[in-house]
């Protein structure tokens, strides 16, 4: 998958760009393959340590001096016109702090399994985007589609290791302070969905993910109040509502990945321990009941019918 990812990045119709590949102390022969590549756009950085997901992202971003920067996963595919389409958007909207696009969802074999599209304008103010993300579902960008305009920032781009699986989402929402947000309604990335991805790993570490969600909720409350998007009481109410509903989605996804009723029961006990307030949320409670007593496909379908579009949670 790494070979396919790098090949797609190097095969862009846009010509003026560089690719920095950071090897975080791999031991599987990856560095030998990387060193065998010959392309003037490519820069290989071999590191002696692995700083974890957020730490490695911060290191990679810091190595770049370009105005426009992005992070790309080693198992995804960049479509040929991705960079040219992004550059066109940044030339059109000079105050745009980041831009993202629709994505094709694929499995391990590269087969199409779905699409990620959003009902948002081509360009929207950062303040409006921040409000929409916490009050509507499906507006969080697909990670490898995001390109950031660093020229508009008066600070470093930092991914918070305290909320590691949600660090990219929080970073982008923080950046909405500096400009507008762009969206290209075209599938410009093939985003791989599989159990070996970071998302799959954290789904299995259910308690840890709950703790990350709780920390993310607290940081988002502070951010919303700081940006004057909501008063403190409303920010708490909104973020609790959507975080708790997100816990329900986590439980349904856990059932999908394991197919185990005992895992669902254990996850409920963990929720009681880590985030008991989630059980007071009707969407989370409905998800738990559906996961306990229905097959996954039926339980997910019923959950979607129970929750209106604007009431669904932030997903990750």
Image (cartoon, rainbow, N blue to C red):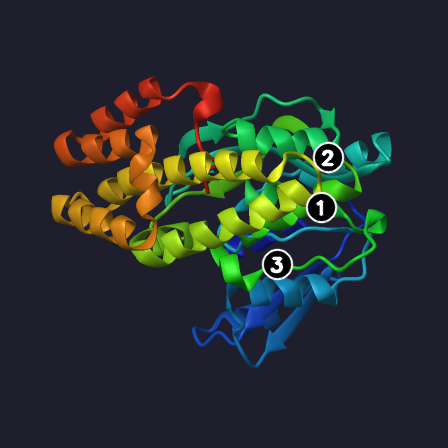
Tell me which numbered mark, 1 or 2, is placed earlier along the sequence: 2
Residue 260 seen in the figure: yes
Q: How many marks?
A: 3
Residue in front for this viewpoint, 48 or 234: 234
Question: Dot 1: within a 10 Å radius of its alpha carbon, few (fewer than 14), some, or many (20 or more) residues?
Answer: many
Q: Which residue is mark 1?
A: 175
Residue at the spot x=64%, y=35% of the render? Answer: 130
Question: Dot 2: within a 10 Å radius of its alpha carbon, few (fewer than 14), some, or many (20 or more) residues?
Answer: many
Report helix, strand or loop for mark 2.
Answer: helix
Vertical position of residue 307 compared to residue 116: above or below = above
Q: Which residue is mark 2?
A: 126
Residue at the spot x=73%, y=67% of the render? Answer: 63
Residue at the spot x=84%, y=30% of the render? Answer: 92
Residue 37 seen in the figure: no
Residues at discs 1 and 2 in contact (Cβ within 8 Å): yes
Residue in front for this viewpoint, 238 or 99: 238
Mark-to-mark CA distance, 3 and 2:
19 Å
Report helix, strand or loop for mark 1.
Answer: helix
Residue at the spot x=44%, y=34% of the render? Answer: 241
Locate residue 84 relative to residue 44 in the image: left or right. right
Q: Which residue is mark 3?
A: 159
Tell me which numbered mark, 3 or 2, is placed earlier along the sequence: 2
Locate residue 156 relative to residue 200 in the image: left or right. right
Report helix, strand or loop for mark 3.
Answer: loop
């Amino acid at each position: 998958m790494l070979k396919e990812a790098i090949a797609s990045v190097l095969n862009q119709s846009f010509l003026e760009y560089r690719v920095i590949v950071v090897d975080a102390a791999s031991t599987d022969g990856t560095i030998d393959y990387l060193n065998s590549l010959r392309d003037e756009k490519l820069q290989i950085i071999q590191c002696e340590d692995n700083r974890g997901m957020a730490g490695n992202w911060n290191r990679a971003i810091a190595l770049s001096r370009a105005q426009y920067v992005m992070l790309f996963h080693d198992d995804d595919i960049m479509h040929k016109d991705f960079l040219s389409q992004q550059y066109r958007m940044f030339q059109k909207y000079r105050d745009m702090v980041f831009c993202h696009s629709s994505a094709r969802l694929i499995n391990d074999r590269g087969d199409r399994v779905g699409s990620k599209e959003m009902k948002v304008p081509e360009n929207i103010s950062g303040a409006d985007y921040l409000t929409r993300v916490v009050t509507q579902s499906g507006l969080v960008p697909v990670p490898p589609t995001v390109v950031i305009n660093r020229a508009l920032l008066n600070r470093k781009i930092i991914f918070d290791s305290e909320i590691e699986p949600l660090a990219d989402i929080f970073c982008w929402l923080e950046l909405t302070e500096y400009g507008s947000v762009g969206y290209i309604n075209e599938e410009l990335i093939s985003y791989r969905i599989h159990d070996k991805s970071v998302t799959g790993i954290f789904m299995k570490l259910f308690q840890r993910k709950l703790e990350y969600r709780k920390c993310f909720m607290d940081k988002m409350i502070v951010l919303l109040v700081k940006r004057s998007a909501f008063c403190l009481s409303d920010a708490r109410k909104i973020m609790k509502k959507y975080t708790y509903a997100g816990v329900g989605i986590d439980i349904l996804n856990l059932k999908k990945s394991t197919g185990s009723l005992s895992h669902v029961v254990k996850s409920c006990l963990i929720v009681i321990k880590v985030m008991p307030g989630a059980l007071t949320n009707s969407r989370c409670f409905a998800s738990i009941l559906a996961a306990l007593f229905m097959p996954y496909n039926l339980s997910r379908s019923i959950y979607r019918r129970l929750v209106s579009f604007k009431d669904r949670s932030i997903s990750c």
